[in-house]
Amino acid sequence: MLEDLQMPRKSPFALVASMSLGCNNVKISANLSYVVCDNMQNLSLVNRTFIVQALEFSLRKRANVSLNVARVLVSQVDAEELEAALEEFNTKIVNSSLISHNWKEVILRALWDERLRNEDRFNETEFVTAWFQRRLRLFISAISTDMLQCLHNETMQCDQYQAIVKGLDAEFTKMSLSVQTDILHSFQIPYLKGLDSDDSSLRCYSSNASFSAFLEESLQSFGDLLTLRDLETLVPTSKLHKFKC
């Protein structure tokens, strides 16, 4: 168990990191701050079981999680062990509603800033499927505007876009209306419209498909939020005749 782990004397780097997180003031209890502070020296060596236990402890305690603490954990552990731990945690927790919105925001922000923001693999379907349909599933309902804006600017094809939408759609009912609307307006519509497309072209649209079928497939549940103004943004009324009904 985490409480029984005996770690060696902290290195100078670990001591500096501990001070920056306020570790000297952390109470001895099973929460994420204590786990990170107590094991600062060896975070790069811990395995997926340790990471899953740390996440489970924090979930059970329902304590506020410090973003700085979460960032240190995410950035210092081995990348493969972290990914495996997130996959295992995803299978253990079926209902993401068990996780508080604040907890989702903190973990998602840490994962985004430390692991995903500067990734260059958003053009790989396997990569985005693994992250957005499994590893981030429990936290994705707290996705923020800046993350969505970064996503629609990524170099990705329709397969990768659809994989991300599928992951978002799976947690649609767990999202607030503002997050649902933000996904539509900050990610889906801008991506489909494209930065350089003219008024009569849409990404991922096939001339052999009906426009309504295209919207249903491309927007999933978020299509229920479409307004006339949104449709006008996608395709001006004067151009609609170019699309099949």
Image (cartoon, rainbow, N blue to C red):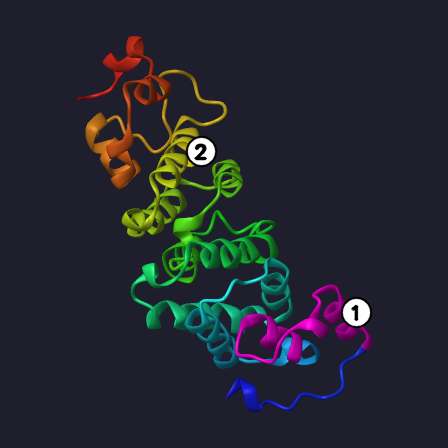
Residue 47 x, y percent position in the rendering: 54, 80
Residue 115 as seen in the image, left or right of residue 105: right
The residue under the point 56% across, 91% down is: 4
- Name the kind of residue labelled 1 in the image: Val
Magenta span has 25?
A: yes
Nearer mark to the viewer, of 1 and 2:
1
Label pair 1/2, CB-CB below 8 angstroms: no
Q: Secondary structure at mark 1?
A: helix
Q: Secondary structure at mark 2?
A: helix
What kind of secondary structure does the magenta stretch mostly adopt? helix
Magenta span has 95?
A: no
Can you tell which quarter of the image residue 183 is in?
Answer: top left
Q: Earlier in the sequence, mark 1 or mark 2?
A: 1
- Name the kind of residue labelled 2 in the image: Ser
The answer to whether any part of residue 39 appears in the image is no
The residue under the point 38% across, 47% down is: 164
Which residue is disc 1 drawn over?
16
- The residue range painted magenta reads 12-39
